[in-house]
């Protein structure tokens, strides 16, 4: 009886380990099409990630497990050239709950009211902002299409994970999936563009009208961000004071 019990525990353990792994979606290479050169890749990524400094204002719905939700406002200044961020999260009445600056050198928290006073939460929040607004750090590893005809760019991240950037045929829906080294999705970001995004002759940058970030672990939550304003800002000292 003890032997059967031990075998049962071993099988359960193996299944648990296996559940932590997943497979990457297979990519169908494009026929007679070489990998995009650096200029074409940059142009493609700039459709999703602005190359210049901008300030974005979003209405945010934060949803936590148990159907708990809160309505907030977020103001983010991004400086892509050195991946610098200044972010403010406030209530609809204007009470600042969180304010921070982030550069490649440091994270400076100016104000943090519970539950945003956790340093781990603050770092996670800034990492999510980086994921949403900045292009992947890793190298392009594969590109082509998926079975559903969506195009895909797959990047290898320095930590062993991957980032897939997937575009619908009409280019109105983009998805970014951040996976661990075991191919589990850690973050998924969906960008919904207005139909004018498909107008390649437009000289003005078209931004997503909504962005939804879903965090799978270690904490589970969803951020639904609706764009209310976007403005080009000065990039005089992006790696210092970004206010």
Image (cartoon, rainbow, N blue to C red):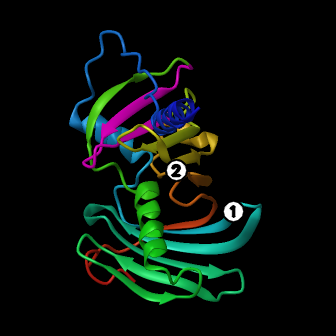
Give the class, few, some or many, for how many residues have Cα within 10 Å of label 2's Cα (few <14, many ≥20). some
Q: Residue at x 63, y 45 (%)?
A: 194
Q: Is residue 32 above or below residue 20?
A: above
Q: Residue at x 26, y 81 (%)?
A: 240
Q: Is residue 212 left or right of residue 243?
A: right
Q: Is residue 39 left or right of residue 50?
A: left
Q: Name the image quarter holding residue 38.
A: top left
Give the residue at the far top of this rendering: 32
Q: Name the image quarter holding residue 82.
A: bottom left
Label 2's element? loop
Task: Find disc 2 in the rendering and name its residue.
Answer: 206
The location of residue 17, given as percent across then percent down, is: 46, 38
The location of residue 3, given as percent across then percent down, is: 51, 31
Task: Find disc 1 in the rendering and name its residue.
Answer: 63
Give the residue at the far right of this rendering: 67
Q: Residue at x 29, y 45 (%)?
A: 157
């Amino acid at each position: 009886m003890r032997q059967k019990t031990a075998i049962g525990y071993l099988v359960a353990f193996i299944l648990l380990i296996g559940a932590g792994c997943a497979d990457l979606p297979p990519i169908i290479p494009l026929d007679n099409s070489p990998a995009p050169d650096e200029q074409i890749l940059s142009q493609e990524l700039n459709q999703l990630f602005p190359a210049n400094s901008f300030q974005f204002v979003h209405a945010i719905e934060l949803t936590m497990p148990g159907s708990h939700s809160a309505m907030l406002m977020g103001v983010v200044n991004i400086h892509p050239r050195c991946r610098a961020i200044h972010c403010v999260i406030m209530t609809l009445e204007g009470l600042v709950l969180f304010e921070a600056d982030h550069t490649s050198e440091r994270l400076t928290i100016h104000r943090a009211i519970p539950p945003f006073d956790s340093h781990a939460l603050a770092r996670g929040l800034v990492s999510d902002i980086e994921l949403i607004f900045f292009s992947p750090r890793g190298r392009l590893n594969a590109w082509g299409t998926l079975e559903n005809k969506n195009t895909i760019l797959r990047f290898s991240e320095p930590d062993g994970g991957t980032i897939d950037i997937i575009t619908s045929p009409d280019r109105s829906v983009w998805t970014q999936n951040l996976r661990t080294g075991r191919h589990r999705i850690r973050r998924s970001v969906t960008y919904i563009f207005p139909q004018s995004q498909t107008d390649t002759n437009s000289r003005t940058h078209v931004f997503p009208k909504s962005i939804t970030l879903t965090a799978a672990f270690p904490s589970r939550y969803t951020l639904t961000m609706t764009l209310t304003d976007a403005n080009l800002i000065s990039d005089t000292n992006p790696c210092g004071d970004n206010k």
